[in-house]
Image (cartoon, rainbow, N blue to C red):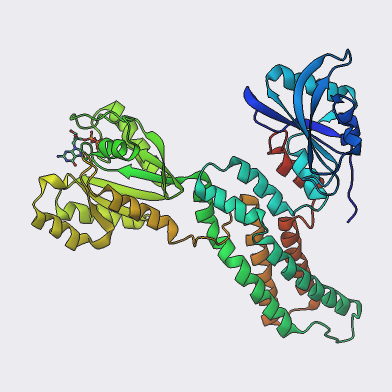
């Protein structure tokens, strides 16, 4: 593939604001020669790729702007595959602005958001799924998001899908060829082989499609609602989990009126904890707002933790609550709080009645809290096998499901013995979605939408 060296662009690659150092990245045609005009030190034009050079940046009056280190990368051995220069300067906003201004005077233009990554993609550095993973990797703020992005960046599912798509193209071509023969009853494409290939593609697609709900949770946090009557100990539990006085703990029932949201990282997974006002009929208006919100929160929950005061609640009441929770499709955990108020025999009775769905804890001392958190992690992990690729991106999910739908129609067509033209249409549809997924088919609109989500300098 020939590398396209486009007009030179520049941007601050490190986070804006004051820092010890900042890195300005320049990429494109003549990037090295243009930088050398504002740099005093060795002649950058004579230096090998992947070398670092100390020198100064000077303005047109030859005044020193900063002492810098310049790293040069020669095409095609760079991130964008173009000539790239990285100027490490001091992290002052003034210095950064001056250096960028000097570069602009030399004919460099400011980069658009995501333009470096877009160029890397256009020059074949990686496919679209990997390019999007660059954005996810930069934004990763937990071990799980980092792991998911990294797997995708290293090729993830797109390599496998690309190979299968290639085979599907061959079948589609044969079927299109059959169409050219019109009236003559010829079959170039072996229907059984086509069927086998469709199954093979579905075996790759299906786990990816299924992984999206977990992927989404990993990326955006697992919405965990802590529900329960007033005074069950929800705020105390929340504080114990977060180790800080986020919620106001009080002895007056119903004082936690607002929904408090906080984040908890367990085993590298982000849980968004949502504490709610009690699930009971409210008597006064302020509380009524709280209770209405509880229902809204429950509808958004990925996991529900139902907390109750074990000394004040009967087995029958919890059986009723459990029946209600079972109606919702999300996993739930019954947490029997204030176990210090119970005798061991009573705790055993709770356990015997509800099995592993119930965990007895003591929120005010943190006793047994680890058992509870292990269950929460377990809910997420049973769906996500470590090291496997997890789909976290809605665009990918949509193309995967649409490919699958088209392939189902291909199989239906084969079963029903439908005409070639019909199968050809469905195959084209499947190929289209697979192609858009990995970026083998792109439109400018699609690229613009994807790369504009990056920040400038990436
Ligand atoms: P909320 O209304 O559900 O948020 O309940 P709070 O967290 O405000 O707790 C109500 C009361 O129960 C407070 O006085 C807590 O100190 C007390 N409490 C919480 N957890 C425990 C526990 O495990 N054992 C005992 N004995 N008291 C607790």
Instruction: Name which residue lies at 43% across and 55% down.
Output: 380
| Total numbered circles | 0
Quarter location, residue 16: top right
Please, which residue is most extreme toward the bottom here? Answer: 185
Quarter of image, ligand 1: top left
In the image: residue 28, left or right of residue 160: right
Decide if residue 239 is in sight here. Answer: yes
Q: Position of residue 144 (x, y in %)?
A: 51, 50
Figure quadrant of the C terminus: top right
Q: Nearer the viewer, residue 371 or 217?
A: 371
The answer, for residue 30, to whether it is visible in the render is: no
Q: Nearer the viewer, residue 240 or 63?
A: 63
Q: In screen coordinates, is 44 left or right of 280?
A: right
Up the image or down, 437 lies above or below 361; here it is: below
Q: Residue at x 40, y 35 (%)?
A: 261
Q: Nearer the viewer, residue 281 or 204?
A: 204
- Observer-nearest residue: 14 or 327? 14
Residue 346, horizontal then vertical, whole percent: 10, 55
* Residue at 62% from the left image edge and 66% from the top image edge: 205
Figure quadrant of the N terminus: bottom right
Provide residue 431's location: percent of width, then percent of height: 75, 65
Residue 179 % position (x, y): 87, 77
In the image: residue 179, left or right of residue 192: right
Q: Is residue 17 above or below residue 335?
A: above
């Amino acid at each position: 593939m020939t590398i396209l060296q486009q007009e030179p662009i520049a941007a601050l690659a490190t986070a804006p604001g004051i820092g010890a150092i900042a890195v300005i990245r320049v990429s494109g045609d003549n990037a090295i020669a243009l930088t050398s005009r504002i740099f005093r030190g060795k002649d950058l034009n004579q230096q090998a790729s992947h070398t670092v050079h100390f020198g100064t940046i000077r303005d047109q009056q030859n005044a020193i702007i900063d002492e810098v280190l310049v790293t040069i990368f020669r095409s095609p051995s760079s991130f964008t595959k173009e000539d790239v220069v990285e100027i490490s300067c001091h992290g002052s906003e003034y210095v950064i602005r001056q250096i960028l201004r000097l570069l602009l005077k030399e004919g460099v233009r400011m980069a658009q958001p995501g333009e470096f990554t877009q160029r890397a993609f256009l020059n074949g550095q990686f496919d679209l799924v990997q390019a999007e993973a660059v954005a996810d990797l930069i934004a990763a703020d937990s071990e799980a998001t980092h792991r998911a992005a990294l797997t995708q960046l290293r090729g993830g599912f797109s390599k496998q899908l690309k190979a299968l798509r290639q085979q599907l193209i061959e079948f589609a071509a044969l079927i299109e060829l059959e169409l050219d023969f019109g009236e003559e009853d010829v079959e170039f494409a072996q229907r059984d082989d086509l069927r086998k290939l469709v199954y093979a593609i579905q075996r790759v697609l299906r786990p990816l499609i299924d992984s999206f709900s977990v992927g989404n949770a990993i990326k955006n946090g697992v919405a965990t609602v802590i529900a329960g009557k007033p005074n069950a100990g929800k705020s105390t539990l929340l504080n114990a989990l977060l180790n800080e006085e986020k919620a106001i703990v009080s002895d007056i029932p119903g004082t936690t009126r607002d929904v408090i949201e906080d984040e908890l990282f367990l085993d590298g997974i982000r849980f968004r904890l949502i504490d709610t006002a009690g699930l009971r009929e409210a008597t006064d208006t302020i509380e009524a707002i709280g209770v209405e919100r509880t229902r809204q929160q429950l509808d958004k929950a990925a996991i529900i933790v139902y907390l109750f005061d074990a000394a004040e609640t009967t087995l029958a009441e919890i059986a009723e609550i459990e029946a209600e929770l079972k109606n919702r499709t999300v996993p739930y955990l019954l947490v029997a709080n204030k176990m210090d108020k119970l005798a061991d025999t009573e705790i055993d009775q709770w356990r015997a009645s509800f099995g592993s769905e119930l965990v007895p804890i003591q929120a005010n001392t943190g006793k047994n809290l680890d058992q509870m958190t292990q269950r929460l992690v377990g809910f997420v992990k049973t769906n996500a096998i470590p090291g496997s690729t997890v789909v976290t991106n809605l665009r990918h999910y949509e193309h995967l499901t649409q490919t699958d739908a088209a392939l189902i129609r291909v199989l239906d067509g084969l079963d029903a013995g439908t005409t070639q033209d019909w199968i050809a249409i469905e195959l084209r549809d499947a190929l289209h979605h697979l192609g858009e997924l990995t970026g083998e088919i792109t439109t400018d609109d699609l690229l613009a939408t994807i790369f504009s989500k990056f920040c400038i300098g990436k």
